[in-house]
Image (cartoon, rainbow, N blue to C red):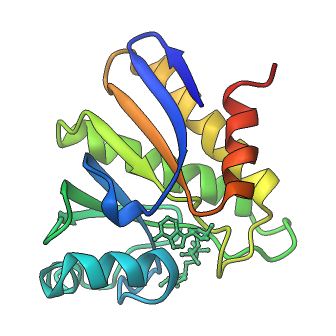
Amino acid sequence: MTLNLGETRLEAVQGDITQQEIDAVVNAANSALAGGGGVDGAIHRAGGASILAECRQFKGGCPTGQARITGAGNLRAKKIIHAVGPVWDGGGHRESELLCSAYRSSLQLAVENELRSIAFPSISTGAYRFPLEKASKIAVDTCKDFCSEHPGALDLIRFVCFSARDLKVYSKLLNPL
Ligand code: APR
């Protein structure tokens, strides 16, 4: 499913984030930038040891709601943006604000590094238990707002859904008709 916002295309696909041939792949990282399971595990496995070595250069890791950029190792991408989403704790602990910030920080880093295309996983909706319906709306709305504020800064924003269920939710947000 695709939505064109000026010169930027937003699209939702089902697939594996590690296989994306795109400028920037976003990792659903933890604040220690230490690797883990899910997307994090897949990216470090596919990308190789150089990624963790670069992550270790960020002393103190990365605060929740922010992102850090490294090389992409063996991935078919130029860079990896390690975004740290919030753990869902009922909704009363700034979770939505922090998730929005994780997406916004990732987009900002992509633009600052002159990356024209970016692929996001569904940040915080796995191990961090953020409800998918809420998280996906935050993801799409944040990207739409960013495109309005920075027209033409990006050619493509791709939401890479791991399941058909997730794809259905994101597709509906991109094309609510
Ligand atoms: N490609 C695309 N999406 C994937 C992939 C993949 N290879 N693997 C998992 N996903 C999906 C999950 O199904 C979920 O929808 O990514 C979404 C995010 O799930 P997690 O990877 O668990 O990320 P998150 O919920 O943000 O939790 C982050 O988990 O792996 C640890 O180190 C990580 O502590 C951090 C936490």
- Split into 4 quadrants, where in the image is the C terminus? top right
Q: In the displayed structure, would residue 160 be above or below residue 126?
A: above
State which quadrant residue 144 falls in.
Answer: top right
Q: In the displayed structure, would residue 39 be above or below residue 122?
A: below
Q: In the displayed structure, would residue 60 be above or below residue 167?
A: below
x 60%, y 31%: residue: 1
* Residue 128, position as x, y percentages in the image: 67, 78
The reply, left or right, for residue 14 in relation to residue 60 is right
Q: Residue furthest top?
A: 6
The reply, left or right, for residue 39 in relation to residue 43 is right
The reply, left or right, for residue 50 in relation to residue 61 is left
x 25%, y 49%: residue: 21
State which quadrant residue 85 falls in.
Answer: bottom right
Residues 54 and 157: in front is 157
In this figure, what is the number of numbered marks?
0
Residues 168 and 79: in front is 168
x 87%, y 72%: residue: 90
x 39%, y 21%: residue: 150
State which quadrant residue 116 falls in.
Answer: top left
Residues 161 and 23: in front is 161
Q: In the displayed structure, would residue 38 be above or below residue 120?
A: below
* Residue 117, position as x, y percentages in the image: 30, 37
* Residue 18, position as x, y percentages in the image: 34, 65
* Residue 93, position as x, y percentages in the image: 78, 69
Quarter containing ligand 1? bottom right
